[in-house]
């Protein structure tokens, strides 16, 4: 649905001073064309400057990844609604490690999908659970944050929180649990973080939508 105020459905590139350097998408216009989006949740810039946009935030929106050249020229898109390999019901998070593989948090399908930069399907991982946010650091450590798993979404066995592991092998090493009850209370729909990043010292920062907070985690 197009927003009534003629805003949204866009991706912006800013300078460190806040100057708008590039705009992708058309203000307030949803679509599935080369230069229109429908509720894009995330964007990633590859080491070569190519821009990947996760396009679609729900069953009635788009379900694809859109790739642009560094200057904003459309290159290709891929994806479709579905739960099989390459299907994307909600590409909510993007990340890329040293291998150059595009790691996609396919949230409604409770998994990570991995593609090459031309959109070819490589693998799928379920062990990181239902991810709202993904970050991969300089050591190929993957930080994935689950803010939504519960019984209503068919994953009552998963505990919400941050899972930490290898972006190369998919092995999960550590888990930081979410303190909220996933099946009861005002934050049962979404708690914990949706955005996640780690700094060079290993400090983890979680941006939480439900509690409206930012939390920092560090090793003891």
Image (cartoon, rainbow, N blue to C red):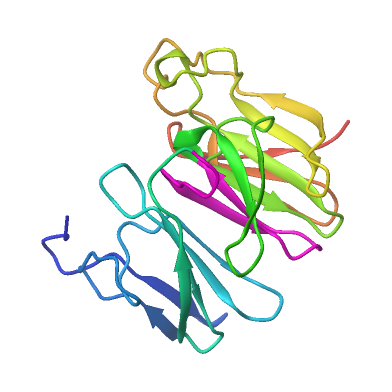
Picture coordinates of residue 85, whole percent (x, y): 55, 44
Image-quadrant location for residue 215: top right
Q: Is residue 89 magenta?
A: yes
Residue located 45% across and 47% down the image: 88
Is residue 58 visible from the viewing direction of this image? yes
User: From the image, which quarter does the C terminus lie in?
Assistant: top right
Q: How many marks?
A: 0
Q: Is residue 149 magenta?
A: no
User: From the image, which quarter does the N terminus lie in?
Assistant: bottom left
Q: Which residues are magenta?
A: 84-106
Residue located 33% across and 77% down the image: 35
Residue located 46% across and 31% down the image: 211
Picture coordinates of residue 165, whole percent (x, y): 80, 38
**Residue closest to the eye, 206 or 33:** 33
Image-quadrant location for residue 50: bottom right
Is residue 197 visible from the viewing direction of this image? no
Q: Residue farthest to the top?
A: 184
Picture coordinates of residue 113, whole percent (x, y): 61, 46
- Compared with 139, 72 (above or below) is below
- Compared with 124, 39 (above or below) is below
- Compared with 125, 191 (above or below) is above
Residue located 55% across and 37% down the image: 193
For residue 115, side relative to residue 152 (left or right): right
- Compared with 171, 178 (above or below) is above
Picture coordinates of residue 51, whole percent (x, y): 55, 74
Q: Residue farthest to the left?
A: 4
């Amino acid at each position: 649905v197009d927003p009534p105020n003629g805003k949204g459905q866009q991706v912006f590139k800013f300078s460190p001073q806040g100057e708008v350097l590039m705009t992708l998408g058309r203000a307030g216009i949803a679509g599935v064309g080369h230069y229109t989006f429908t509720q894009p949740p995330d964007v990633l810039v590859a080491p070569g400057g190519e821009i990947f946009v996760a396009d679609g935030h729900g069953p009635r929106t788009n379900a694809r990844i859109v790739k642009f050249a560094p200057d904003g020229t459309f290159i290709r898109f891929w994806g479709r609604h579905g739960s099989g390999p390459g299907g994307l019901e909600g590409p909510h998070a993007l990340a890329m490690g040293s291998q150059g593989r595009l790691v996609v948090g396919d949230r409604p399908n409770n998994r990570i999908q991995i593609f090459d930069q031309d959109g070819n399907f490589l693998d799928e991982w379920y062990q990181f659970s239902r991810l709202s946010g993904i970050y991969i650091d300089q050591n190929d450590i993957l930080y994935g944050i689950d803010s939504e798993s519960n019984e209503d979404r068919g994953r009552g066995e998963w505990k919400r929180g941050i899972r930490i592991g290898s972006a190369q092998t998919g092995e999960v090493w550590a888990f930081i649990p979410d303190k909220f009850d996933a099946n009861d209370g005002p934050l049962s729909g979404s708690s914990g973080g949706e955005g996640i990043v780690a700094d060079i010292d290993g400090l983890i920062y979680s941006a939480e939508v439900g509690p409206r907070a930012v939390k920092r985690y560090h090793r003891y």
